[in-house]
Amino acid sequence: MPLHVPPAPAPALRTVLTALGSPTAVREARTPSLRAIQGPASPELPLPVHVLDHITESTGPSRARLTGWRFLIRSGERAVAAADTMLTPDGWAFSHFFEGPYVASTERALRQAEALPQHYQPRLLSVPELYMLTLWLHGDHTADAATGHPAADDILVPLAPAPPGIAAHRPHRVAELLPVLTHRLTPARATTLLA
């Protein structure tokens, strides 16, 4: 089934296009593959980036919050880098270019998701407490991409590199993976409190 990639805010896309068109921004980026491109590069597959904070707090359920949009930068047939944008008090702003394993891993996870039988809205979900990034396949493909919380039947696909003990590129329902993540963090917090 096709993924329903949400449209990025126009100002976020404009900031990435401006940065791609700036020789200074590209030259100063720590992305050798972006600097080595021969020919045009284009931002594609905008994904809203949500952060899941405080997954072990007893004050209530964890909440996902939108922190930016990520664009894969394509040259030819493959993504060579990514560009992040962030929301500032003045609106959307370009944050930075980067490359590395998450670029290829995101492409791979999106290809996996295309083969699933259900329609999904792809998003990225970061779990900073575990240094973990997942492709979040939201079941309500018509939802506002800037809002929402992972539903129990949504799918999370951990991207590589995943934390030890969590298999990258293995799809999990949120109801199955979130308790595992919470359990992994709980002992660490208890040890920290006792020290």
Image (spheres, rainbow, N blue to C red):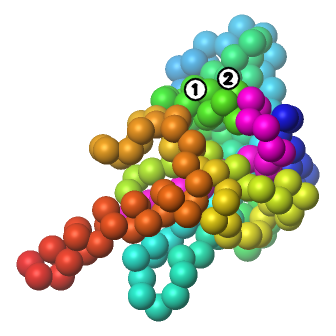
Please check the rendered image and state whether residue 124 is part of the magenta-colored stretch, yes or no: yes
Q: Assign a secondary structure to mark 2.
A: strand
Q: Residue furthest bottom?
A: 59
Q: Amino acid at mark 1?
A: Ala
Reply above or below: 148 against 159: below
Q: Which residue is mark 1?
A: 104
Please indicate, yes or no, whether residue 60 appears anywhere in the rendered image: yes
Q: Could you say which is closer to the camera, residue 147 or residue 93?
A: 147
Q: In the image, residue 7 lies at what x, y percent?
A: 89, 49
The residue drawn where x is 52% and y is 88% is: 60
Q: Residue furthest left?
A: 195
Q: How many numbered marks appear?
A: 2
- In the image, which disc is placed on residue 80? none
Please indicate, yes or no, whether residue 27 appears anywhere in the rendered image: no
Q: Are marks 1 and 2 in contact (CB under 8 Å)?
A: yes
Mark 1: few/some/many CA within 10 Å (<14, 14-19, 20+): some
Q: In the image, residue 112 lies at what x, y percent?
A: 66, 30
The answer to whether 147 appears left or right of 106 in the picture is right
Q: In the image, residue 64 lies at what x, y percent?
A: 62, 69
Q: Which residue is mark 2?
A: 79
Q: Which residues are magenta?
A: 114-129
Closer mark to the observer between disc 1 and disc 2: 1
Q: Could you say which is closer to the camera, residue 169 or residue 29?
A: 169
Q: Could you say which is closer to the camera, residue 9 or residue 184?
A: 184
Q: In the image, residue 111 lies at what x, y percent?
A: 70, 27
The answer to whether 55 appears left or right of 146 in the picture is left
The residue drawn where x is 25% and y is 74% is: 189
The answer to whether 179 appears left or right of 97 in the picture is left
Q: Assign a secondary structure to mark 1.
A: helix
